[in-house]
Image: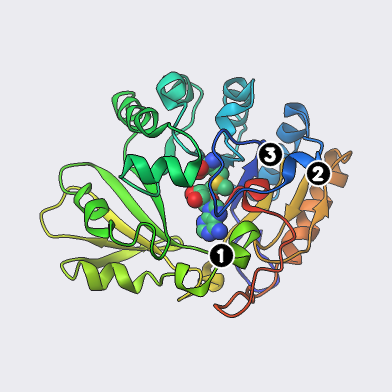
Amino acid sequence: MKDSYNRQICYMRLSVTDKCNFNCSYCKSGVDKQKRKLLSFDELYNICVEAVNCGISKIRITGGEPLVRSGIIDFCKKVSNISGLNELTMTTNGSLLKYYASQLKSAGVSRLNISLDTLNPTRFNQITSTESYNEVLEGIKEAQKCGFKGIKINCVLIGGFNDDEIKDFVSLTKDNDIVVRFIELMPIGESANWQSDKFVSNEKVLQTVPELKMQSFDGVAQMYKVDGYKGYVGLIRPMSDKFCGVCNRIRVTSDGKIKPCLHSKDEFDLRGLVGSDLKDMIEKAILSKPQSHSLEHTCCSNSTRFMNEIGG
Ligand code: SAM
């Protein structure tokens, strides 16, 4: 269905848990202390069904880390079979993919986005507070082996941390059928209080690799390529070139709140609703989607949640 600004809303990001086996410094929160109560998989499934009835054709499963929630494969299998849903995808940190990639493929997950902010194992340990670098690389390889095509590697650029790795990330696209997407760090949750020099415009990617040639727009990403390279480079610029005019998404948190906009504090509670009541509330949330978010370099997100509670 269309929102009040004539945007076709067809994409839902569904967080199935706020728990994560990583503790990324820009994303983490005191969520364990807040103890938000997760919806059951049956409740999440009902939301998916009614969202599809409202015109959602693509669902992305996210978290926290979606693969840490037990029962996730059966849930994906059920959701992918909803009539009217065209695409079920997942965003993951990749650390458990070597165990789950094949099952995800069989369960109907068609595409994967994998977050990876650095190609340097020491930095990886530092930012994630884990030692899972090799697991993530093995997970990516396993996913490719299982037939996942066009895997997207999402890298959040952070000034003074990984902005000297831009060329290395672009080089990954030379021989690999992957898309490396640079995402601008947003001041939300933990990073809301970070110094301004951590917020790097994606313009820096184009300055560092001038060989990148603009190809097209893919949703919120501007797509580039180096001539002769197999893969693509995407730039997602919520800060330097916000894309609210083409925003086609809603988000559902694992405790059952719809967020019409990532950076708004507005939420609509779906817990306890079923059938037409549930559908009505989803429609209400879509119609209340604001024209644009107010996030600029000088001001923080109005969202009261941390990213691991929303799902990105
Ligand atoms: N655990 C999964 C993962 O790692 O992809 C899914 C959840 S994670 C919250 C989703 C995405 O949000 C990740 O790519 C992460 O880098 C991104 N993210 C978290 N905080 C962010 C911020 N402040 N600015 C930009 N992206 C952020």
Task: Compute the Cα span from label 2 to label 3.
Answer: 26 Å
The residue tagged 3 is 48
Identity of the amino acid at label 1?
Answer: Cys
Identity of the amino acid at label 3?
Answer: Cys
Q: Is residue 164 above or below residue 115?
A: below
Instruction: Inspect this view and state whether residue 59 appears.
Output: no
Please provide percent x and percent y for residue 178: 28, 44
- The residue at 70%/37% (across/down) is 49
Identity of the amino acid at label 2?
Answer: Gln
- The residue at 26%/70% (across/down) is 206
Tag 2 near tag 3, CB within 8 Å: no
Q: Is residue 248 above or below residue 72?
A: below
Disc marking residue 34: 2
Residue 186 quadrant: bottom right
Neighbor class of circle 3 (other Cα within 10 Å; few <14, some 14-19, many 20+) is many
Task: Compute the Cα span from label 1 to label 2.
Answer: 30 Å
- The residue at 40%/72% (across/down) is 201
**SS for dot 3:** helix
Please provide percent x and percent y for residue 140: 34, 32
Residue 52 quadrant: top right
Q: Is mark 2 within 8 Å of ligand 1?
A: no
Q: Is residue 258 above or below residue 81?
A: below
- The residue at 43%/61% (across/down) is 158
Disc marking residue 247: 1
Tag 1 near tag 2, CB within 8 Å: no
